[in-house]
Amino acid sequence: MLRRKRALLMTMGFALACSISVAQAQSQGQNPALSESNTEPYPSRPIRLIVGFPAGGASDVAARAIAGHMAELLGQPVVVENKPGAAGNIGSEMVAKSKPDGYTLLFGTISSSINGSLYKNLTYDPVKDFTAISQVTSTPFLLVVNPASPYRSVKDIIDAARAAGSAQKLPDYATAGNGSGSHLFMELFTSMAGIKLSHVPYRGAAPAMADVMGGQVPIAFDNILTTLAQVQGGKLRALAVSTTQRSSVAPDIPTMSESGVPGYDATAWFGLFAPAGTPVAIVNKIAQATQKSVLTPEVRASLLKSGAEPVGSTPKEFDTFYKAEVAKWARVVESAKVKID
């Protein structure tokens, strides 16, 4: 009888201990059914890195530059997949609707922060449907002119625009199309300078810059990645960089602020996003791999050579930056009444 009582008391004590353990785990927001022993380690299979633009472009090149190093750090392949179309919206939508498990990521661009204001019928929310992981780069635009044009400074353009008024034709500027970065960077400039210029939209940056170099249109605002070589070759004249700091690859070119437009700050950028709801531990692990990859000597040198400044921010830093970008470009789009044809 004594043995039975002891056995019963031991059983009751074990059951009580288990119930206390479960209660403690639940109070701490943990699921006691998911222990380290039966939770799949991340990553355990290849990761897809979606680029919303064609292979060979600036975003594709940058994505592939860090993918190999990320794969080494994470212990799984990071496979770059190009899903071009609709200014990056096709790739963005794909990632936004993917399972939030860290295996489908978006290599976002400045378009990610602009498209929500330009396209009214998006099937995803550019802010709510993504989790920011890390900003990879920051890249200035260059305000450039044809070398034969009369414009030798930003002030020359401002003076010409003010002198023209309604009495004569405003100076023309070329862009990669309505709503493109080159368009909105110029709209921000004209708004802050209090002037008007005549917009000449093209179907892409290449034909726009070809006409600026050919003298058909005198002015353009475009990515330093595609314009610096032409400036160095004498085919374009650079007047200013769009960022608050001078570019490390072109330190002799003044900023817009230094050139008479105080406070002007606009940058193109690349960054990693995951679908909303991706576990924080996974987001942090990807962010750490991204930061280390961006700062490796090989990747850093490659990015700087192309004109991009390596960043490698934390998820919190990138989230703050991204939301500020969305708000800024929404104001520019609304103020300029930009419409997509």
Image: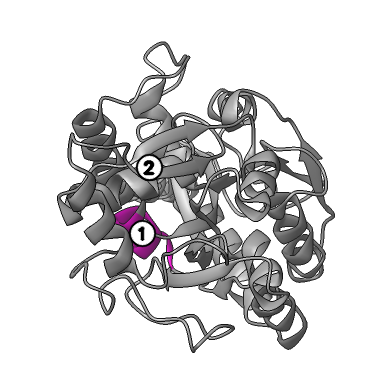
Q: Amino acid at mark 1?
A: Ala
Residue 168: image x %, image y %?
Answer: 27, 37
Q: Amino acid at mark 2?
A: Leu
Q: Nearer the viewer, mark 2 or mark 1?
A: 2
Q: CA distance from mark 2 to mark 1?
A: 10 Å
- The residue wearing badge 2 is 184
237 is within the stretch colored magenta: no
The single residue placed furthest to the front in the displayed view is: 167
Q: Is residue 15 above or below residue 232?
A: above
Q: Judge left or right: residue 52 versus residue 137.
A: right
Q: Is residue 32 visible?
A: no
Which span of residues is magenta-colored?
314-321
User: Which residue was labeled with disc 1?
Assistant: 266
Q: Secondary structure at mark 2?
A: helix
For the residues labelled 2 and 1, say whether their Cβ atoms are less than 8 Å apart: yes
Ranked by sequence position, the earlier of labels 2 and 1 is 2
Residue 161, percent from left and from top? 25, 50
- Which residue is pictured at 60% across the width and 39% down the height? 101
- Dot 2, how many residues are within 10 Å of its Cα: few (below 14), some (14-19), or many (20+)? many
Residue 158, given in percent of the width and then of the height, sits at 25, 59
Q: Secondary structure at mark 1?
A: loop
